[in-house]
Image (spheres, rainbow, N blue to C red):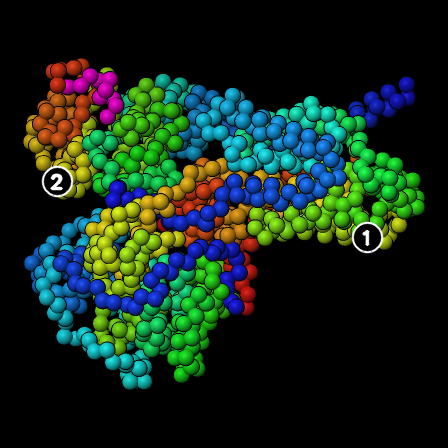
Amino acid sequence: MKTFKLGGVHPEENKLSAASPIRGAALPKQAVFSMFQHIGAPANPVVKKGDTVKVGTLLGEAGGFVSAPVFSSVSGTVNKVDVALDASGLRRMAVTVDVEGDEWEDSIDRSKDLVKLNDRPELDGKAIVDKVKAAGIVGMGGATFPTHVKLCPPPGKVAECVIVNAVECEPYLTADHRLMLEHPEEVLVGLQLVMKAVGVNKGYIGIENNKPDAIKLMTEHAAKYPEIEVVPLKVKYPQGGEKQLIDAVIGRQVPAPPALPIDTGAIVQNVGTCFAIYEAVMKNKPLIDRIITVTGKSVKQPSNLLARLGTPFQQLIDECGGLPEDTGKIIGGGPMMGKALLSLEVPMTKGSSGLLIMPESEARRAEAQPCIRCAKCVGACPMGLEPYLLARMSEQFDWEAAEQNDIPSCIECGSCQFTCPSHRPLLDRIRVGKATVMGIIRSRSQK
Amino acid sequence: MNLILLAIIALGAIGLIASVLLYFASRKFAVHEDERIGQVSAVLPQANCGGCGFPGCAGFAGACVKAADAGSLEGLLCPVGGQPVMGQVADILGMKVEASAPKIAVVRCNGSCENRPRIAEFDGAESCKVLQMIGMGDTACSYGCYGCGDCTRQCKFDAIHINPETRLPEVDEEKCTACGACAKACPRQIIEIRLKGPKGRRVVVLCSNKDKGAMANKVCKASCIGCGKCVKTCDKFEAITLNRNLAYIDAEKCKMCLKCVDACPKHAIHAFNFPPRKPKVETPKTEEAV
Amino acid sequence: MNKPIISLSPHVHGGDSVQKNMYGVCIALLPALLASFYFFGLGAVVVMLTSVCACVFFEWAITKYILKSERLTIADGSAILTGLLLGFNLPSNLPIWIIVLGALFAIGVGKMTFGGLGQNIFNPALAGRVFLLFSFPVQMTTWPDNFNDAIDGASGATPLSLMQKAILEKDASILNDLPSSFEMFLGQTEGSMGEVSALLLMIGCAYMLWRKIITWHIPVSIVATVLVFAGLLHLANPIYANPLQVVFSGGLMLGACFMATDYVTSPMSHRGQLVYGVAIGLLTVIIRNWGAYPEGMSFAIIIMNAFTPLINTYFKPKRFGEVIKK
């Protein structure tokens, strides 16, 4: 069975919600739409206080090419356009809407019927990309990189295949797993749309073999399309990393930055993104909702919810049995790469793949001990870096040495810190170093 | 006897060959440097703090010599050595140097544990930049000090320390050389290098919060809420400006009347090193602590 | 709910710890330890107890009274491990005061002067052994008669000294006095306590590999290098011993599995570990055959310990995307 070649770890899977079907979350009373739901330039609000909006109304237009518009996922009145705490832990520009009823824009097709690619022969690549761009679709795996940018390879680069990231290597999370089980056809059409948009005729779906039901179902459905291949992958974190997935599926490694994944000829899209692309192109529905896993060892009902963007996390956890007494840490995303949240007031965004509640007994890190130079971090690093060294250089502010030792290649997967017997905060240090070195590189290239 | 002779000859030959090699090597690889650079370097503090804007003291010495050749030492200042050292440098290079007022680092945040409650517990590497990546940090203030001491780790003069009670950095006025390393290290740009003032007396707004008044008021007892009362009391000198809900006192224009200190409803404006006026005002000793 | 805890990711940990690794190595040493008790009797127990207790005591005393550190480090198991390894490197009839001196050197000079766990350049146990070997050469190389003496008739000369004698006197017939390689593999030779049974040491090594405490790179590269190098010499000239006998004799197995794999003093990347292993193998054979001492393993490891920082600088792990496969 295939997997990526360098490093990797095996965290406990804890897929508590794998068997719970996707259910719709109730509408919130008030929804908050951050203008910073993607990587790149923030969206610019186009509504003002007192405006009436419907589901699918544009709230913020894209602030540049690498940016994405933001749509309202509820109907009601704009309460304020002001800074609000968001999932990044910062107070940033957001539109707050008081919810009244559930009125949708007429242009959105709300029927459940499957629309196949053959049903819409008039669609060409450019039309698909335009639809994706207009619908505000971003990478749904958590990276939130605007999808239309990925669908337009830079000049001189040629795409050869599309890989669907259905690995879901993060422990606890099951949103992608359930999506494949419940909407396999839509995902496949979404993949076909991506393939058509970038003009390739080879598509892979990479699934880790801890989801045998999804592999079976997707293989059955994909049998109709000879150009699509389901690739079962050996379970190993961080297989869902873009570079690791390309290595695992087609055996090519992306060279060090500034090279891009497209240099291997592969375009990777998350399975949730494929579904969103299907809905955007075939149903004319902008990105207004997503599947989010609400889970945790003390959570009464670990669930997969189809929730409107902008819903406060508090409401989602209430639907799953309320916040447990012993809560120690609230994490937006998975335990390996997710972000600790300051409060449950923050709204879910396009990149919210999970809401994980960690009991206090597991939430604290153990006390750091001296590095014993065991080289386990070196063995675990999927990028072939030396985390112990990079962390030390960062601690000593030796940015030059950190750059020479390829600190910008770090994908911040956390394997090093996960495996460190001395419980050292390796990734904390490396992140500081990486951010500083990237800043130095940027300022140098501007000169 | 033979043995001793042989040893003398052998060692002598080795020494001779080595000295010849060394001689040619030293000639071949000799670096010609303006000797004034060495002289200037000798009077510099050799802390290599980078406060002057050059990489180390040698770099600064080189820049001084270059500037002297160009005709003026203007804009060059060793913040550590200050005027005495610059005077020496000017003497060596046969130049004159104008006096500049001494400066000091000021931490513009008074969000002690008492004033600004912690809303979360931070668990990770002790670094402000790590907290910055998490977002607001462990308080609700989006602008205040993180209290993890990135500034203290960059200080070459042991002049800035985190007070464990307030979890805020404190500047040692005796030791601070205003080199600016701490200001550069602070991810929230809270530390300002500002005029030390006559006898060390200065009036400073100890807050960096640019949020609207209601929000700033909620997160911290000692925050500037941008009410503008200080601006009105200072209409005679126009030393105080309000920018994005935050008052700023221009040290050049401030006449030290202390009216703004009394006017501030949040006690965000502090006077350093003034003699005690009323029993209400704290002694200078504890004022340093904020 | 109290205040939430915030930190950067990852929010979970694999559960590995320094203690687990250190005690894991101790467990891996158990079979060989029991065998040495069996072969050498009460003397071995006394030596081992003295060595472990002395190492733990010095670690505790130095952290508490010299470094004045709040955090005592004896619980992490590294001092126990150093004591065990030092004991394995000593003859079972060594006077107690010499052992205590060795422990003081191992912990005090070999480890604590550099800053304690994780900072030392040389493997502390080996530093202690080499110190004793230079200071007390007679006591360190006088091994007790173990019960096999009566059977194989060896007159106190170890296989290693026989091998060196064969080379010095250019007389291959001396090698006939060596026990067979199979006997050596099972463990019927003389020497220090940890050198008795290659088999049991290999079982311990297999356990460490299974628990992922170490990777295969260092032990395999050392043993393979010795096999190849000694094999070539043996083929070229029969006065050099059979490579299997070379591998199973003396401290080679102990060194390859337990001393060279010491975390702190071995290189970090797999490439570097291979280089390190090969160099140790070569040095060991060279010192054994042409050096002044019959055993070269400790010296080879100590020498390569010194080169580890250099190896770390020049042998980086294979970066992702370094070679693009087509």
In the rendered image, which quarter is residue B127 located in? top left
Quick one: label 2, few (<14), some, or many (20+) residues within 10 Å? some
Residue C169 spot, x, y in % from top left: 92, 40
Q: Amino acid at mark 1?
A: Leu
The stretch of residues the image draws in magenta is: B281-290
Residue at 49% x, 29% y: name it: C72
Q: Secondary structure at mark 1?
A: helix
Quadrant in which residue A270 is drawn: bottom left
- Residue depicted at 55% across the width and 60% down the height: C323
Q: Quadrant of the N terminus of chain C?
A: top left
Question: Of A240 and C82, which appears nearest the observer?
Answer: C82
Reply above or below: B67 against C185.
Answer: above
Q: Chain of mark 2?
A: B
Q: Report the magenta stretch's main SS.
A: loop
Q: Give the residue number, with chain letter if any, for mark 2.
A: B213
Query: Visible in this render: residue B138?
Result: yes
Q: Residue B44: x and y, percent?
A: 43, 23
Residue A303 coordinates in the image, percent (x, y): 29, 62
Q: Magenta stretch: residue A135 in it? A: no
Q: Is residue B288 magenta?
A: yes
Q: Please report contact status of discs 2 and 1: CB closer than 8 Å, yes or no.
A: no
Q: Image point 31% across, 52% down: which residue?
A: A298
- Chain for mark 1? C
A98 or C19, which is in the foreground? Answer: C19
Res C279 visible: no
Residue C232 is labelled as 1
Q: Position of residue A45 (x, y in %)?
A: 17, 58
A253 to C38, vertically: above or below? below
Q: For marks 2 and 1, give the one nearer the viewer.
A: 1
Mark 2 secondary-structure assignment: helix
Disc 2 to disc 1, C-alpha distance: 84 Å
In the figure, is residue B228 to the left or right of B41? left
